Image (cartoon, grey):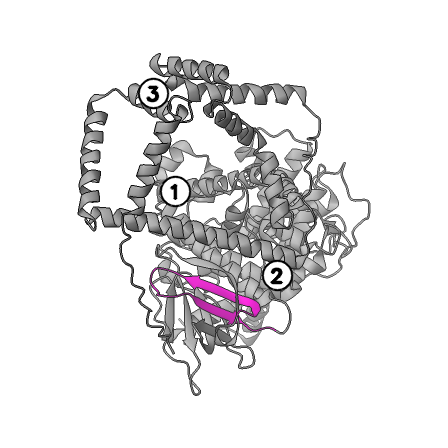
Amino acid sequence: MDTIVSPVSASSIKKDSLTFLKSLFNNTEDDVVDSQAAAPLPFLSPIANSVISSCSKILHKPTEELQHCFDTEHPNYIKESLVYARSFIEFCSYQALNSMTRRPDYLADKKFRRLTFDMMLAWEGPSAENELQETASCSNQEVEDEEGWSLFYSNSANMAAQVDDNKTVGLEAFARIAPACTVIADVITVHNLFDVLTLSSGHKLHFLIFDKYLRSLEKVIKSAANVNTSSSGSNLQLTEGEIILDIDGTVPTQPIFQHIGISGWPGRLTLTSYAMYFESMGVGIYDKAVKFELAADMKQVIKPDLTGPLGARLYDKAVMYKSTSITEPVYFEFTEFKGSSRRDYWLDIILEILNAHKFIRMYNLKKSQQSEALARAALGILRYRAVKEAFQNFPSNYKTLLCFNLAESLPGGYTILQTLSSRLSLLDESSSQRDSVRSPRANRQLRHPISHLTLCRHGIVSQNEVGIDKEETQQVGDVCVGEINPLEMAVKQSKQDIGRAEAAQATVDQVKVEGIDTNIAIMQELLFPLIESFNRLQRLASWEEPSKSTVFLVLVSYVILGGWMKYVLPSVFLFVAIMMGCNRFANYGKPLEAFNITAPPYRNAVEQLLALQEAISELEALIQAGNIVLLKVRALLFAALPQATDRTAISLVIMAVVFAFVPVEYLILLAFYEAYTREMPLRKESSDQWLRRMREWWYSIPAAPVQLIKPDDKKIK
């Protein structure tokens, strides 16, 4: 029998369904409100409780569960301590950042930028004992995005703590939180990034500056993604895995000029992760790109240089590129009305890619390790672009934002490269090997190429090039909860030597003096002990005092014949070491006294030029004499004068027999006797006659002819 449903029952069913859906929705809201209104953790400050609450909503886990997970993974921390509170904040923050950064557009969300800054504030004032003096104002608005993780601030009176914009973040908090998001900071250069961002704020980071940096970084990354996915780089014929990092010269009013010899062409320059490409500007189009290799070992030389029209060296706005693949250097001129910031930026990023490939070759990195190293360099360049466009800051070598350039500029930068290579080597280890020697936290940190994955998530690298599931990857950057990264320790150790290096360089700059005469006077005073020793030996060899000369002759003969010659050099080294040790203890803590030098008579500019000309003439005469000696030797070798050649050949045969059969100590003694007794009264007359005959014989030898051929001076036009 058919069941008859009355209109009343149908309407009641519809009403009940709506009531159920509304109840379900209200329960969801109630759950959120209950989560927001959870009791704060007593050992945390209000801002820390607010951040933990936000992380709880993002991870969809209650605060108690997060604390239980933390206590399980980190059982050695003592509760109610400052270290425990900060480590717990790091634990929740790192997991929340990992969840948030799975979205490609997270940098564009102000709530993400706000929460990241609040994490730093919470790290600085984590515990209730270190509670910030100013009570943060509460927010009465409830914000939630489509996926639910952007619900950062709630309307709970107990948990919400909207942070005042006047609050600032210090270096330690920035260095612990920022590298957890790989795109924001690199653990190698995070301290330099903080110094650049806080250059005008007394080494304290304001949210407005941090927000401006992230917005600029978001624009730069979006631009890089568009360039790599569009057709603008199709004419470059990029290799697999090669990405475009920057392009300049596209604006007609600011082209880049390529100079080869006296010729120059305007065009645009493109830097990729493997090479530079220059496309000269044609009539409405660009010509075929010329590739300048950075990846292969071609002994590239890249440095700042002067350039100008027709090869004139006028403007300090160029980058010189030289390698074994090209016949003559190529100069890229970055035209700019004042300053050379445009050139300096391109010089830095080109050297970063070159140094990255040197690092790859030095440690023989494999494919996945190479991709990670290049991705780290690429992210550094993107951060550099963001800072340049947002703040117009160009840090020095020791404050650079590029990790491989920093390792090259620091005194002990090789330790940074060694540490980085050891960490990259973990990428190719099997999971079982890692589990047996590494902690779970280290495995999460080192399991995947994080920098390469970051480029993939932002659309700069094709997803097909990353053979891992992006949604399942735990990406927490180069940081671990409660631990100091080895890279950060290597950077700190290297930076400790900067002060000593700069102080030493300052002393070098102070002692640099102008004038040839002054520098010669300084050198003579510094070499005075050696010069005086040589003069005394000459006086002994002149036999002006026969008794002293005889004693010295007998002493040297005993040393040679007694086999003591092998101990002479070690004795000299030992004597110098003992003297240095005595000075070390005698002058401990005392400043080094200035070295007094008598200044030479003053000379005006014309007199100095004449002295320089005379010195150059003397140098030219010495070079001519050396060339004559070489040409006469050539004439002897090719028998230009047969009689002289015969005598020379017979002399060489006799010398060969003597060296073959006579012991070395007797040869040394014979050479010493010949040189030392030449001015002896008994030998002086015969020695002078023998030397005169040798000079006459030498003068009779003709020099080999020389013909100068002018090269064809053909320049590429």
Was residue 324 drawn as part of the magenta stretch in this picture?
yes
- Location of the C terminus by quadrant is bottom left
**In the image, which residues are magenta?**
313-336
Instruction: Using the image, determine if residue 694 lies above or below residue 245.
Output: above
Q: Quadrant of residue 32?
A: bottom right
Residue at point 63%, 55% (across, down): 608
Determine the secondary structure under disc 2: helix
The nearer-to-camera label among 1 and 2 is: 2
Between 531 and 544, the residue placed more toward the observer is 544
Q: Is residue 554 left or right of residue 395?
A: left
Q: Position of residue 670 (x, y in %)?
A: 32, 22
Measured Cα–Cα span from mark 3 to mark 2? 71 Å
Q: Residues within 10 Å of mark 3 (few under 14, many from 20)?
A: some
Q: Across the whole image, how many numbered discs are drawn on residues? A: 3
- Residue 563 at x, y = what percent? 34, 14
Who comes first in sequence, dot 1 or dot 3? Answer: 1
